[in-house]
Amino acid sequence: MPLTRIHYTNMLKRRASAVWKGGLQEGTGTMSSFSGALDNTAYSFKTRLVSEDGKAGTNPEELLAAAHAGCYAMATSATMAQAGFTPDELSVAATLTLDTDTLSVTAVDLQIKGKVPGMTAEQFEEVAENAAKMCVISRALNPSIQVTKTATLEN
């Protein structure tokens, strides 16, 4: 059976959906993604502004932080490849700050740790800095949002 060539265009589209029922404070909702990674995942006012345990569902800001962490890890790996390195492991924690008075994202702090054979701490810092500028989610955020990062090489 011949291999089928996959044609990609220059414009990728990613789909997700949300359903909300009720008023803001007492209402509940679900979010789903086309890939199935989210499948009627619960969210509510309480999971957005009150609950930090995550047991009652997620919230848009948590998902944005997760997307930023994933994007930054991939961007760092790509930047390392350009410098001739392949990481054994990159671990990223993203902390998104939401001002609950204005409902504005005011900052994202990226903490990256890496195990990269042959790489110095200085090289890791430079790659991490360049990757922060290359990350699609970093670029998608409002330029007035402060995106910071900390890079730690664990060799």
Image: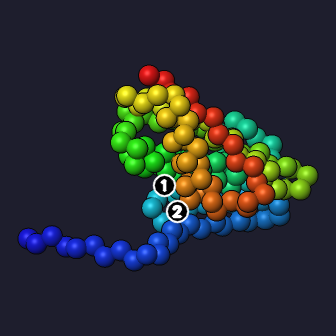
Seen from this angle, which residue lies furthest left? 1
Where residue 28 sits in the image (x, y, percent)?
73, 58
Where residue 41 sits in the image (x, y, percent)?
59, 54
Q: Label 2: which residue?
A: 33
Between 79 and 102, which is closer to the camera in this rendering?
79
Quadrant for the C terminus in the image: top left
Binning the other alpha carbons within 10 Å of mark 2 as few (below 14), some (14 to 19) or many (20 upward) gives some
Between 29 and 4, which is closer to the camera in this rendering?
4
Q: Is residue 80 above or below residue 64?
A: above
Q: Amino acid at mark 1?
A: Ala
Q: Is residue 93 above or below residue 155?
A: below
Quadrant for the N terminus in the image: bottom left
Q: Which mark is residue 52?
A: none
Tally of numbered tags = 2
Q: Is residue 80 above or below residue 1?
A: above
Where residue 75 sits in the image (x, y, percent)?
49, 50
Marks 2 and 1 in Cβ contact (< 8 Å)? yes
The residue under the point 37% across, 39% down is: 85
Q: Which mark is residue 37?
A: 1
Using residue 29 as the reference point, say whether residue 102 is left or right of it.
right
Between 15 and 58, which is closer to the camera in this rendering?
15
The residue under the point 56% across, 59% down is: 136
Q: Quadrant of residue 50?
A: top right
Where residue 25 sits in the image (x, y, percent)?
84, 56
Q: Which type of secondary structure does the marked residue at label 2 adopt?
A: strand
